[in-house]
Image (cartoon, rainbow, N blue to C red):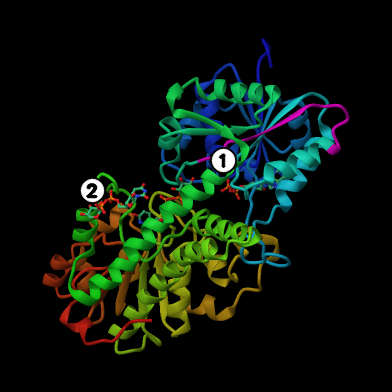
Amino acid sequence: ICGKMVKICCIGAGYVGGPTMAVIALKCPAIEVVVVDIAKPRIDAWNSEQLPIYEPGLDEVVKECRGRNLFFSTDVEKHVAEADIIFVSVNTPTKTRGLGAGKAADLTYWESAARMIADVSKSDKIVVEKSTVPVKTAEAIEKILTHNSKGINYQILSNPEFLAEGTAIEDLFKPDRVLIGGRETPEGKKAVQALKEVYAHWVPEDRIITTNLWSAELSKLAANAFLAQRISSVNAISALCEATGANVSEVAYAVGKDTRIGPKFLNASVGFGGSCFQKDILNLVYICECNGLPEVANYWKQVIKINDYQKSRFVNRVVASMFNTVSGKKIAVLGFAFKKDTGDTRETPAIDVCHGLLGDKAQISIYDPQVTEDQIQRDLSMAKFDWDHPRHLQPTSPTAFKQVSVVWDAYEATKGAHGLCILTEWDEFKTLDYQRIFDNMQKPAFVFDGRNVVDPEKLREIGFIVYSIGKPLDAWLKDMPAVA
Ligand code: UDX
Ligand code: UDX
Ligand code: ADP
C-alpha cells in the first residue's frame, strides 16, 4: 500500500456496499473503488440511470464518481485479485434450516466470498468485514484465508457499518463514529491504520474508534439491540398508555428530556422492521445461548417478542373496531416500506399486518410511493425469513393475489374503503386531503395510524374514528376489547 495508488474492491453491491463505496470514492479521488456482485441485474442497474436502491442523495454521489474512480462490475475475481483492501458486504440472512435455524446467521455467502478471495489472491490483502456477522466470524474467515494462503499475508478487520436506510448518504458523510477492529499484532495495527487513513479523508480523527476484533463485531450487534430495545420499550409503554389514558408522545417526550436517556428512537410505532434489528438480535440471542447464557438470551429475545406483540395488537385493534370482522371489507394500506424514504421492505411490519388482515379475509389496497407491486406481491406470498432467498421462493398463494391490489395513489387506495391503515411514516401522508378521503370512504370511516403521522383530533373533526398508537382512545374503541 505504501506509495502506490490504493485499490479498493467491495464484494456485494447492496444497501450497504453500494452507498458506502460511492461515498469513499467521492471523498477519496485518489483511490480506485470497484464494487462487484454476482448478480448481473444489480450491477447493470448500478451502471444505469435507475440505481437499484432508492436513497436520498445517492444519485448525485454516484453520478459524480462513476467512471472516474468508482466502478461497478460482475468480474468479481479480477477486481478482488487487484485490490489492496477488500470489503465484504454480502448478505448474511438468518438461517432457515439446520443448526440454529431461525436464529443464527447464514454465513454461506460470506464463506464462499472468503474462499474465492483465497483462490484468486496473488498479493497481500486487507479483508474488511462490512456486513453484520456474529462475533468471532473474523476468526473463521482468517482460518479459511490462512489455510489456503499460498504465502499471502491476510489481515482481517471488522468495520461495521452504522448507516440507516433513508439517510445513508447523510450518515456516511457525517458518521457519529467509524469503528475499526483488528488484531493487536504489528501487522494488525498496520492494517487498521491503512483503513483509518481512508476514512480520515473526511471523518474527524476523534470519531474513528479502533478496538480489538471482537469488540468491533459485538458493538454492532449491541448497538442494534439497544436501538431496537428503545423502540420495544416505548411500544410496550404505548399499550399501557392506551389502557390508562396517558399519551405515549407526551410520555416519550418527558422521558427523553432526561439527558441520560435522550430523545431519539422513542417514537412508538406499529413495530420496527428493516434488515438489521431482528436479524442482529436473533444473532445475539443465539450467541448468548451458545455461550451458556440463557438469561441474557431471554432478556434480548423479549425485544423481538414485544415487537411481534405490537404488530398483532395493531391488527386486533383494526378487526375489533370494525365489529370484529374485516371479511370482504376493503382496507387501504398507506405505506409498505419498513420506514420512510426507502423502497426497502425487508422485515417491514406491513407484511405481518397485511397477513393478519388477509387472515381475516380483508380486501387490501396498498399504496407506497417507493415500493412496486411486484415487490409487495412477492413479500406477501413469501414465508417468513425468505426475503433473502429469492431463488427459493414459495409458490405464490393465489388468495394473496386476489385479495391484494397495489395502486399508485393514496386516494385510489382509500376509495370505497371501510378503514385505512398508515404503516409507514412517509411525509406525504401528513398532508393528504383527509376530507376528500373521508368523503369517498364507507361510513363509519376508520383511520388506524401505526406511525402517529396524523393529528387524531383534526381527523375526528372530519368524522373519522381514529386509532393512534399509544394515544387516548376514541369512545368507540374503548368499548371494543382488543388485546392480543
Ligand atoms: C434514580 C434516578 O437516577 C433518579 O432520576 C430518580 O429520581 C431516583 O432514582 P438514584 O437511585 O439516586 O436515582 O441513583 P442513580 O444514579 O440513578 O443510580 C441508581 C443505581 O444504578 C446505583 O446503584 C448506581 O450505582 C447504578 N448505576 C447507574 C449503574 O450500575 N450503572 C450506571 O451506568 C448508572
Ligand atoms: C438500523 C440502524 O439504525 C443502523 O445504525 C444500522 O446500521 C442498521 O439498522 P435501519 O434499519 O436502516 O438502520 O433504520 P432505522 O432508522 O434504525 O429504523 C429501523 C426500524 O425502526 C424502522 O422500521 C423504523 O420505522 C423503526 N423505528 C425507528 C421506530 O419504530 N421508532 C423509532 O423511534 C425509530
Ligand atoms: P446489505 O443490506 O447487507 O447490503 P444486500 O442483500 O442488499 O445486503 O446485498 C448483498 C449483495 O451481496 C447482493 O447483491 C448479493 O448478490 C451479493 N453477493 C452475495 N454473495 C456474493 C459473492 N460470493 N460474490 C459477490 N457478490 C455476492
> Which disc is residue 258 wearing?
2
Image quadrant in which the C terminus is located: bottom left
Q: Amino acid at mark 1?
A: Ser
Q: Amino acid at mark 2?
A: Asp
In this picture, is 86 found above or below 373?
above
Is residue 57 in sight in this rendering? no
Question: Was residue 430 drawn as part of the magenta stretch in this picture?
Answer: no
| Within-10-Å neighbours for mark 1: few <14, some 14–19, many 20+ | some
In this picture, is 26 found above or below 394?
above
Mark 1 sits near ligand 2, with its Cβ under 8 Å away: no
Q: Which residues are magenta?
A: 147-161
In this picture, is 61 found above or below 42?
above
Label 2 vs 1, first from the N-terminus: 1
**Residue underneath mark 1:** 215
Picture coordinates of residue 26, whole percent (x, y): 51, 24
Is residue 413 in sight in this rendering? yes
Where residue 100 sits, quadrant-wise, is bottom right
What residue appears at the point 53 percent right and 42 percent down from the top-left corner? 50
> Which disc is residue 10 wearing?
none
Where residue 396 sits, quadrant-wise, is bottom right
Disc 1 secondary structure class: helix
Residue extending farthest to the right is: 150
Picture coordinates of residue 276, whole percent (x, y): 52, 53
The one nearer the camera, 49 or 273, is 273
